[in-house]
């Protein structure tokens, strides 16, 4: 029976990835890294017509991250900004676009707050993650609103065929940090399953100087993840997955009498069925639910509640209309709902979308086109599209070019927040050109891309009253579609994995300009770079990362300058026994003082240790 694209995606998504692992050798690396986010089907990174980075479980454990942004910072085209560390508000800028222009997916579930528009990156637990796929460039024509800069998809831990295998860890370190977790995963010929539970807690650091108390602002997160699938004899497969996190994060607001804190819930749930209708037609029907909830307390007293929930359905079809032509088409819909002590003029809205992707294999040439129609209850309809071309110039060298349009829907705060919102807002719109090349030879690879993105109708807060009294505190602001941005950039990413050596490097050069003022867009550094290097010595391994950023500006007026910095992180591990491993890391080795958001402190030198158990 011929395997269609959807069944191939299922198979490859549940196959262990061999990218950049310390134990990999040249022979193992002939198996290419697979991703499924760029076009909703399984493709190797070498085959895709997009700029893609994949971070697998081996790399996650090797890097020993304390928070999810440790995995993203400094990657090609990626920059992060945090209001301090450990569970504090976090922004991710992909290719210089706004913080709410990157779509976060968790196992296919759309995440993000309907009120603020951004995703809660700070609450993602690294221990529950199997792999991360970063797709840079517009993907609205496939996924809908928010994907102007790109898509980051997080896949939770997976089970594979074999007897149940237990994994566990316990660790701790600086700032009275402690963590622990346990999980089990396995599978049979027809059923795969995984279940894990983890807890992370830290006293943290003082978020802001001279604001509120001088105490440390802590964070705790308890997370549960489960994933299960069952395939019938006729090929029909049922699946479901859950990632649920809850906890508390403290912050500084000015109160000196009691802690300021926020209780949060961050969750993604999805279930569905995949059906092989014919040898050339697979269909999938799924339903999902996401939550982004926070109850906020100032001085120990309840202050505000912002709970947003999203229900979604997706019907997708993969059809091989010819041996060299694949069509992916589907319909999806979601409804956002807001529950808050703040009274919004509207508390829900729906979005209905229809999408299609066509891929044509012409030997050394590949063509891909996508088109999507969205009907949004608030601002009406929108059509976006993308075209891409690839050319296999030589066996190791592949060229690509693409052009795509995208949009970002205004948030509930932009539209309906009392005394502030503007229900007449239109969606933000963008267009992106990209040229890229990828060279792969044995254990080496190098990927390069140049791009230009223009964003129109950017939403910005404009003063509409009391603007000339000389006191900005009395200004009356309202969001309006006024700004335009032009973002140009160069991305380089390369890697090497052979024998006992593993390395990966990335460099991004960025020119992100507000066309109305000529100012640089805030918190976008013109230069960012990252280099990871690891070496294994039998049972020992040593490694380190260097992350560097040039200066940027904290505000749109380019007055508040953030200094550039460089960080060095070192790590080591020792395989005590086949099933036991001891890990240690020292972050910010040279105790650099730096900020990624003006006025918010970042940790100095910090050390952590972790003991892992993995049943073989």
Image (cartoon, rainbow, N blue to C red):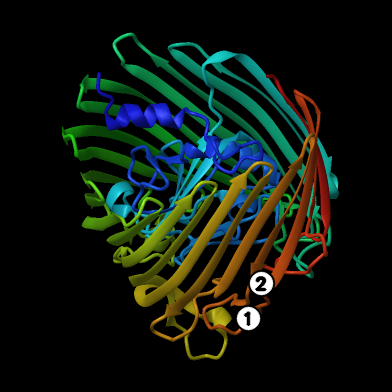
Q: Residue at x 57, y 29 (%)?
A: 225
C-beta proximity under 8 Å, tags 1 and 2: yes
Residue 202 position, x and y percent, is: 78, 45
**Residue 393 coordinates in the image, percent (x, y):** 32, 57
Q: Position of residue 268 (x, y in %)?
A: 48, 35
Relative horizontal placement of residue 554, taking residue 98 as reference (left or right): right
- Above or below, 571 relative to 550: above
Q: Is residue 177 visible?
A: no
Position of 597 relative to 274 (above/below): below
Which numbered circle lies on residue 560?
Answer: 1
Residue 598 is marked as 2
If you read the primary sequence from the N terminus, does the residue marked by circle 1 or circle 2 appear first?
1
Image quadrant assignment for residue 479: bottom left
Disc 1 residue crowd, few under 14, some 14–19, many 20+, Cα 10 Å: few
Closer to the camera, 143 or 61? 61
Along the viewing direction, whichever of 221 and 480 lies nearer the viewer: 221
Which quadrant holds residue 190? top left
Quick one: SS at disc 2? loop
Q: Quick check: 1 left or right of 548?
A: left
Q: Position of residue 182 (x, y in %)?
A: 69, 25
**Spatial distance from mark 1 to mark 2, Cα to Cα?**
8 Å
Above/below status of 48 relative to 580: below
């Amino acid at each position: 029976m011929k395997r269609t694209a959807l069944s191939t995606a299922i198979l490859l998504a549940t196959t262990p990835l061999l990218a950049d692992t310390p134990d990999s050798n040249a022979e193992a690396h002939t198996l290419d890294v697979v991703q499924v986010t760029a076009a909703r089907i399984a493709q190797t990174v070498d085959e895709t017509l997009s700029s893609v980075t994949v971070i697998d479980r081996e790399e996650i454990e090797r890097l020993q991250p304390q928070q999810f942004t440790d995995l993203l910072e400094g990657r090609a085209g990626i920059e992060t900004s945090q209001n301090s560390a450990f569970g504090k508000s976090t922004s991710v800028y992909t290719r210089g676009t706004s913080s709410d222009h990157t779509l976060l997916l968790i196992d296919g579930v759309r995440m993000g707050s309907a009120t603020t528009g951004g995703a809660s990156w700070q609450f993602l637990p690294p221990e529950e993650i199997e792999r991360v796929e970063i797709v840079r460039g517009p993907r609205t024509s496939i996924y809908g609103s928010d994907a102007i800069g790109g898509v980051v998809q997080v896949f939770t831990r997976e089970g594979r065929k074999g007897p149940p295998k237990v994994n566990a860890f316990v660790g701790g370190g600086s700032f009275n940090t402690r963590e622990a977790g346990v999980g089990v995963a396995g599978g049979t010929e027809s059923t795969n399953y995984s279940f894990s539970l983890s807890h992370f807690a830290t006293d943290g650091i003082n978020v802001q100087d001279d604001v509120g108390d001088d105490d440390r602002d802590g964070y705790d997160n308890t997370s549960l993840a489960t994933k299960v699938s069952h395939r019938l004899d006729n090929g029909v497969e049922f699946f479901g997955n859950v990632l649920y996190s809850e906890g508390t994060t403290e912050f500084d607001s000015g109160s000196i009498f009691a802690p300021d804190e926020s209780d949060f819930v961050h969750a993604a749930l999805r279930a569905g069925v995949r059906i092989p209708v014919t040898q050339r037609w697979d269909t999938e029907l799924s339903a999902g639910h996401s939550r982004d909830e926070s109850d906020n307390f100032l001085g120990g007293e309840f202050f505000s509640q912002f709970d947003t929930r999203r229900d979604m359905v997706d019907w997708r079809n993969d059809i091989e209309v010819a041996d060299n032509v694949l069509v992916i088409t589907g319909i999806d819909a979601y409804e956002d709902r807001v529950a808050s002590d703040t009274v919004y003029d509207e508390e829900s809205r729906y979005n209905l979308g229809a999408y299609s992707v066509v891929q044509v294999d012409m030997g050394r040439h590949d063509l891909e086109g996508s088109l999507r129609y969205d009907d949004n209850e608030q601002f009406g309809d929108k059509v976006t599209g993308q075209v891409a071309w690839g050319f296999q110039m030589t066996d190791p060298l592949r060229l690509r070019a693409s052009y795509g349009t995208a949009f970002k829907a205004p948030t509930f705060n932009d539209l309906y927040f009392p005394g502030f919102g503007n229900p007449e807002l239109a969606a933000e719109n963008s267009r992106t050109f990209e040229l890229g090349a990828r060279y792969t030879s044995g254990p080496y690879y190098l990927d390069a891309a140049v791009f230009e993105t223009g964003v129109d109708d950017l939403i910005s807060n404009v003063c509409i009253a009391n603007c000339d009294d000389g006191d900005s505190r009395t200004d009356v602001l309202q969001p309006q579609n006024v700004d335009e941005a032009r973002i140009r950039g160069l991305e380089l990413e390369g890697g090497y994995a052979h024998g006992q050596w593993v390395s990966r490097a990335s460099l991004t050069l960025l020119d992100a300009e507000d066309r109305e003022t000529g100012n640089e867009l805030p918190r976008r550094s013109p230069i960012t770079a990252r280099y990871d290097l690891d070496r294994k010595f039998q049972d020992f391994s040593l490694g380190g990362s260097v992350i560097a950023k040039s200066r940027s500006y904290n505000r749109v007026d380019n007055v508040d300058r953030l200094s550039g910095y460089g960080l060095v992180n070192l790590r080591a591990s020792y395989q005590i026994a086949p099933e036991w491993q001891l890990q240690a890391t020292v972050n910010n080795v040279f105790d650099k003082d730096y900020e990624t958001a003006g006025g918010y402190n970042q940790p100095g030198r910090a050390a952590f240790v972790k003991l892992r158990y993995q049943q073989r």
